[in-house]
Structure formats: structure tokens, C-alpha cells
Image (cartoon, rainbow, N blue to C red):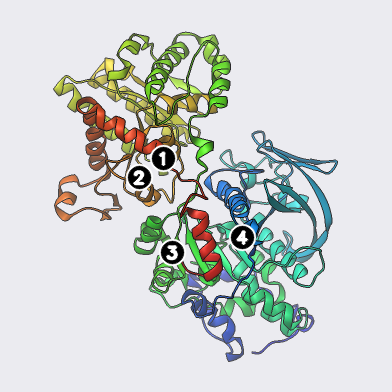
Amino acid sequence: MSFESVKENASVGFLKKGFNNKRLLSSFSKVYSPDLDFVRLAAKTECLGLKEWPEMAEINAWMLSAETATFMKSGGLGMVASELPENFNKTFEHLNHQMTIVTPMYEGDTGKKKASFENGVYEGAEGKSVYVQKIGKTDVLFTDFKGALKSYAVELFVGNLNKVQYIFLKNQRFFSINPSKKNPPAQDGAYILNENNINEVERFAFFSKAIYTLFCDVCRRKFELKVPNLLVANDWHSGALSGLCKYLTCFKEHDQILDHQTAEKIQNTPIIHIAHHLGYQGWDFENTARLLNGLYEAYAIDVVKNARAIKNSNPRTVNTLIVYDSYNQASANFHLSDRVVTVSKNYMEEVSKEKSFGFDFRDILKIRKNHQTFFGIVNGYDKKLIEPNGAKISHMNSYFEGFDFKIYDEKSLRNKTHNKKECIKLLSKIATDSNFKQKVIPLIETDHFSDISGLVSKAAKIPFICATSRLVEQKGYDIACSALLKIAQKIKEEKGEFPIVAMGGAGNIRLYEMLQDFRLKLKQINPQMAERVFVFKGYKDEFAYALQLAADFYLMPSHFEPCGLTQMEAMAKGSLPVATATGGLVDTIENGVDGFKTDVFFSGGIKIYGSNAKAQKLKNNVNAYAETLYKALCLFKNSPEIIKAMKINAMKKDFSWNVQDGSVYKYFKLFRTGHL
């Protein structure tokens, strides 16, 4: 079966609903024609790095991201999308290199996040605004709910902020964030099931198709935009892009929808995929046929039948576009992008070695790593945003009224102890004054806060521990609770001093209930210990900031942590992270120098770090973490000068993007050469 025109085959080129009901798509893993070898061999070509990296005298990259810290953020993914281009442009603009951000123009109100466009001003969900200019529109072919191909108009707007040009894609059907009545409570922001019943997977499949359509238009000079010579896809949201550029372009060139010069440009422009947490891939079994038809139009059958994965040992990934019969938004980029980057070097090792980290893509990433098309670069974090800040502390004092938190730095830690005293007073005030609690943290649920103001005079001698991460299983609150119970029993036997512990955040109600249960169990060991524990559900920036300014130690017992930003925030404030040895925590914390890490870490019974002797001794994450945390507490008691030196080391550390040999320079080298 060779190429045939869209007009002649429009009735037979579409995948039928339910075609993916057979396990592992065995009938779609066969090669049907040698004429389509370019599809069959594309994954091998890209994973093995068989294409020559183009020379770039001037880099003009597009950062393609569903989230940005500036206009719509849910986590670190959005921060990378804004901060990498901002710092790249500041560092390299004198050499005429630049990055542009392409992102949806979200509009609507989820109840928590609100974005609007009026009178030429776009105000995003993070409270920032930008003047934009409309440069035209592009028509994007995609399927409707009935599976028919339709042309959807996407308006294009351009604005500039923080030395970065933004290209906004505006379409109410796909990018509205007004929620449907059926929207699950946990879904918000860019991930909302919206009023048009568009879910996140369909939204970002359309986002990928809109980027591809815009790229084609720009290559054909339809708009006055500089043609990019590099595409940077920020995680799974633009994960379909490589398949469109490699597969769809060939069919469109054959049918003379795209001219040869344009097709060649699209196929040969390098795509770098930045992978954050590999557990998020964007899959949709039920709508597999409809989404693939929307992406590949009347060529869908030919594409899917020949989209062969590079040979690997996982029968679930025999097709580059489908994982275990389900459309998978990330899969195309993992197989077909020119390079894959993840957000720390150690996470790169984990995902390419352990199935529990790399999921269905472990074998693909192992092949890529061995052939140097997969790299790890730690996320940057602008130090001036996370170190103790005078203006922010002044605002916090005004917000809480009557409190006097003070600024400090690595040259003098005296005010950090002062802040610990202030935080003890703050927690006690919240515990004893219901009106004050309602005024300052009305949306935060608190569990039996106690008045510990009597400890203020002893503050220098009592360790203060906090954790303000999201209440999600990843963050390992279960490990922390079990470890603290072990330590409490040990302290009781030794008649020692139990630390002050404040932990909680926004997220899962079940995990908050687990924290409450932990406090009850601690009360059974020793009621006085339980009085020193403050657990809460919800997030308020001023409250979290007060805890971080006060804390001696910050809990990071993560089950996995691709990069981690919270440990960087803690270190900048002289709060020493106590971490499991996973992901970016390994790359950013130097054990015994500026924080503490476990010697071993287990995932699903598999030993990741440590000798066999230690593995037999420690046996699981809880024991490993309890031992590490107890060591930190003993040092606090017996060697305060060591803890002080470690705090100074932590505060001196600078993870900013553009420090010497910082992450922005690593990305620059990757952009220029395709290697690190």
C-alpha cells in the first residue's frame, strides 16, 4: 500500500472507534509497505541519534508549554517554562540567541484560578498582565465529539514580558478554564474538565496540533514571526509534536499540501523533549481513535499501522503512539524527539534503570542514554526569589500583626533563632485565639494546635522541623510519620528532647487524616510530645514562609522527586533538608555538608543505593529515613557548631540558572551541539 491522496481516501483513512480493543494492537504492529519505511524506522533513527545535529549560528528556540509560572502554573513544570527562557535570553541575547514561549491563552474562572483577556491586555491566573497584539489566526484541523474532522480557528497574539516574547494561542473551546459541572474536585487550572467537556488530554492533543499548524504557517511565511530552528517541548502536553513533524509532514508533502522546502524544514528542526515526572503521560483509552484521527487526519491508519517503536523488551510499547492500546500523549516525543532531557541527572539514571521510575519508557530511555540522546539537567531556581527577603518578611509581619520576623543571611544566623521564637509564638497564638486563626489562615484546617509559648526561652536548644510540600503520596509523608514514631520511642527511652514539628499542605484529605492519626499515635507514646506537633491541611504563603524561616530541618522523605524545588527553598533559608536519596535530591544535597540523605532507598523492594550489608540492616525506606533524621537531631544536640556550619553552607549554595556552569549554560550547549 503506497501513498494515496487525502481526497481519494478520506473515507478509509480514519481509525474506527474501538480499533484498540485487542490487547497490544498486534494487528497494527506489522509493516504494510516498504514505501512507508520512513515511518517504521523513525524511532530507531531518533533514539540512536543517527541524524546529524544541525549547526546553529543563532539559536531561535520555541519553548512549548501548557504551563508558565507567569500566567498559569501548577508546579515546577511551569517555573521551568518561564525561567529557562528568561535566563537564557538575559544571558545570551548579546549573541543574538533567543527563546520564545508558545502557550495557550486560557480564559475563565475555576474558582481558584482566573484568567481574562480585555482591551488588548491578557491577565493570567498568576496575577501578571501583558499587552498583546493580534497577528492573525490559523485554522487547525481536529476532530469533534462525533469524530468528524473540523477546522477550528486559533487566534494568535504576541506580547513581551521579562525579555521574552510570548505567542498566545486563543481558542475558547479548548482553552477555556470555566469548569464543567462534572469536573473532578482535584482538577484545576490547565487540567480542568471545562464547560465544553474538553479534558486535559484532548486539550493538549489539540495544543500539539495547533503548534504544528502554526509551525507550518511560519515556515511558509504566513506570519511575520522568525522561523524557529529548535523546538523545546515542555513535558507531555506537547508530546504529540514529534509524531506530527516526522510522520504527518511526509504524507502532506506527498499529497502536495506542503512543498518540499517547508516539509524538509519541519522534519529536520530538532525537537528536545523535557520530561518532568514520568508518571504523567496524558493517556486516554476511550478516545484513542478520535484523538489519533484528529492529529493525523485521513492518514491515521497508515501512520498507526507503521509507527513502529525501536526494538525493546516491553510488549506494551510496540507502537510509538499507543501504549498498551491507549493513546499516550508523551509516547511520540519519547520515541521520536531528537533529544530527551529530564530535570536531574540522578532521575535520568532512575528512569532508565528502574521500571517503577521509568514506567513503560524505561527500555526506550535506557537505549537513548546509551546512545547519548537522553540527558539530565537540574532545574535552576533564582536564588533571589527564595533567600530571606526583607520586603517579603515585612509584608508577613504586617499580615500577622504584632510579630517581628527578621531578615538574616549566611553571615549571621542570629535572627534565624529569633524567627524560631517568633514562629513558636505564632503557632501558639493560632492555637489559643480562634478569631486570629480565622483572620490569618481561614482556609487552613488545623488539628489540635497547642500553646507551646513556654518553649520560647528554650528555642535555641529545641530542633524545629517543618514540611510544607503538597499533600500527595509522592512527598512521602507516610515515611516521615513512621520515622518520627520510631524516633519518638527512642527519645522516650533516652528521656531526650522531642523536636517541634509542623507539617502539612494543600492536597489529599486522606493524607491529612494520616497526619492526624500520626499525632494520635504519638500522643499514646507521650502526650507532651504530641503537643509539639502541628499538622494542617491547606496552604497560605505567609504561613509556609514563617515555618521555613524558623525551621532547623526540612523534611524531604520523597518516594520519588524528579528534581525538587522545595529543598532548594529550604537550603536558601538555612533549613537543612533531610531527604531520601532519590531523583534531584541526590544531585542538589551534599550529605553532611548542606543537608542529610539516606544511604539507601528502596522502590518496590528493589535496592537503589547502598551496600548489601546496609540493605539488610535498613530493609526499607522508613528505617533508612528514621536513621538519617535521628542522626541530624543528634548532631543538633551534641554538635551545634556542625549544624551551624551546614546551615551556612546551605545558604551559600546557589542554584540560579545563570551562575557559572549553571543549568542555562548546559541547555545552551545542548541546543548548540545536541550533547552535554
- Residue 671 on image: x %, y %: 55, 65
Position above or below: 5 against 444: below
Query: Of marks 2 and 3, which one's residue comes earlier in the chain?
Result: 3
Kind of residue at badge 2: Ile
**Residue sitting at x 19%, y 24%:** 491
Q: CA distance from mark 2 to mark 4?
A: 31 Å
C-beta proximity under 8 Å, tags 2 and 1: yes
Under circle 1, the secondary element is helix
- Mark 1 and mark 3: span between their CA atoms? 29 Å
Q: Label 1 belongs to which residue?
A: 567
Taking the spot 72% from the left edge, 44% from the top edge, the residue there is 195
Residue 294 location (% of width, % of height)? 69, 66
Estimate the spatial distance between the alpha carbons at disc 2 and disc 1, rounded to whole Å. 8 Å
- Decide which of tag 1 and tag 3 comes sooner along the chain: 3
Residue 230: percent from left, percent from top: 62, 67
Helix, strand or loop status at disc 3 = helix
Where the C terminus falls, by quadrant?
A: bottom left
325 on left or right of 245: left
Q: Which residue is mark 4?
A: 238
Q: Could you tell me residue 54's position as x and y percent?
A: 59, 75
The one of 630 and 306 positioned closer to us in this rendering: 630
Viewed as shown, does residue 495 lie left or right of 38? left
